[in-house]
Amino acid sequence: MVEFDPFSTPEHEAYIAKLKEEMFNNPRKSLAESIVASAKNGDGKLGIADYFQEYIKHGDPEKNGLVVKAKKKNVDHNSRCERYLLKTYPLVKKEERTVWVRGMPFKKDLHGFIDWVAAHHAKGPFVGVQLTSIGCKSARLRKIAQSKPARKWLNDGNSILLLCYGQPNGPRTPYVPMEFWLGHGELDESNERAEKRNKKRGQI
């Protein structure tokens, strides 16, 4: 069995040539800075082959601080939510709106907590859906629990669904919807927990 030598590839030779050029043109840069600069493609991203060579020669570049990971983009679950709700409810409408304040876009929910409204019939009762990721579940629950319109929504015979998307099987796996139905009891419990936390922190 012939052992694979990553340093004998044309990609590695080209990478080394580019690295030497970078170090020659910028002698004040550290080796790590030169490695990152020379490994970038025209679009500013690290090439796969160059990234692999960094790993072989210097260990995991992310752990060693040689590569700064790109900021994770917010995942938009609205299309997933619509498909998921349409499996149960024939009437589904997005109620979240984008409003512009001084040239800046802001998201505005119906009554401050509803992203989507779903129903079996046009006359209701209606399901107010708050859409979020599983990591933001607690924050969204606290927001709804402190909302007076949410209480009125429930008193009018409607329902509140906190629909959270997560990846329970780890990164790069499909997103899975998780339903949390909220009534007065759940909202009261959330407020009680928040009050206890505030007392413990000395805020009350």
Image (cartoon, rainbow, N blue to C red):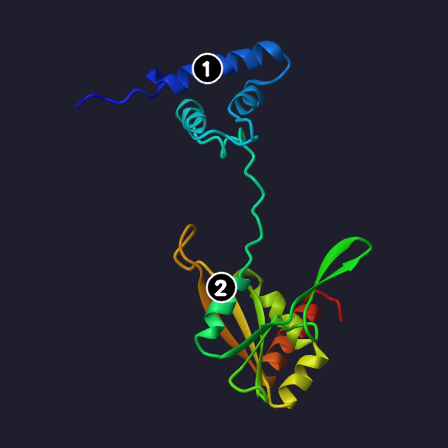
Q: Give me the residue at 63% from left, 81% from top.
A: 188
**From the image, which quarter does the C terminus lie in?**
bottom right
Give 190 or 136, whichever is nearer the viewer. 136
Q: Which mark is residue 148?
A: none
The relative height of residue 176 versus residue 128 in the rendered view (above or below) is above
Spatial CA span between label 1 and label 2: 45 Å
Q: Would residue 192 appear left or right of 172 to someone viewing this image? A: right
Type of the residue with mark 2 = Arg
Indicate the position of residue 36 as horizontal and vertical percent values: 54, 25
The relative height of residue 62 versus residue 135 in the rendered view (above or below) is above
Residue 133 visible in the displayed image: no
Name the image quarter holding residue 156: bottom right
Q: Residues within 10 Å of mark 1 (few under 14, many from 20)?
A: some
| View extreme (top): residue | 24
Indicate the position of residue 171 as horizontal and vertical percent values: 43, 51
Q: Would residue 143 appear left or right of 72 to someone viewing this image? A: right
Q: Give me the residue at 68% from left, 86% from top.
A: 152
Q: Which mark is residue 80?
A: 2
Q: Would residue 176 appear left or right of 189 to someone viewing this image? A: left
Residue 203 visible in the displayed image: yes
Residue with the mark numbered 1: 16
